[in-house]
Each structure stands twice: as C-alpha cells, then as structure tokens.
Image (spheres, helix red, strand yellow):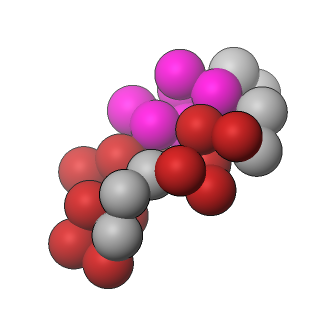
Amino acid sequence: MDSGTLVMAFGYGNATFGPPTTFSTGS
C-alpha cells in the first residue's frame, strides 16, 4: 500500500492517538 493511502485511511483516526508518523514512514 501507498504511504499516502495509509495516511488517508488511518490519518484521521491515528490523529486522535498521535501524529500519523508510523503510517507515513511505514510505507
């Protein structure tokens, strides 16, 4: 999956717990 797709999918939810750094760098 694309890192952008992950941010899109988890960014809004992960923002509640913390910045989507894990998903962004987990490309």
Would residue 6 appear left or right of 17 to someone viewing this image? right
Q: Residue at x 53, y 50 (%)?
A: 21
Magenta part of the chain: 3-8
Per the image, is 23 magenta? Answer: no
Name the quadrant of the C terminus: top right
Task: Name the foreground residue: 15 vs 8.
Answer: 15
Q: Position of residue 4 (x, y in %)?
A: 53, 22
Q: Residue at x 45, y 51 (%)?
A: 20
Would residue 24 appear left or right of 18 to someone viewing this image? right
Name the quadrant of the N terminus: top right
Q: Is residue 7 above or below residue 16?
A: above
Q: Position of residue 7 (x, y in %)?
A: 46, 37
**Callout count:** 0
Would residue 20 appear left or right of 24 to someone viewing this image? left
One can see residue 13 in this view: no
Q: Position of residue 5 (x, y in %)?
A: 54, 26
Determine which quarter of the picture holds residue 14.
bottom left
Q: Residue at x 61, y 48 (%)?
A: 23
Secondary structure predominantly adopted by residues drawn in magenta: helix
Q: Residue at x 24, y 51 (%)?
A: 12
One can see residue 20 in this view: yes
Task: Name the foreground residue: 14 vs 25.
Answer: 25
Q: Position of residue 6 (x, y in %)?
A: 56, 38
Per the image, is 4 magenta? Answer: yes
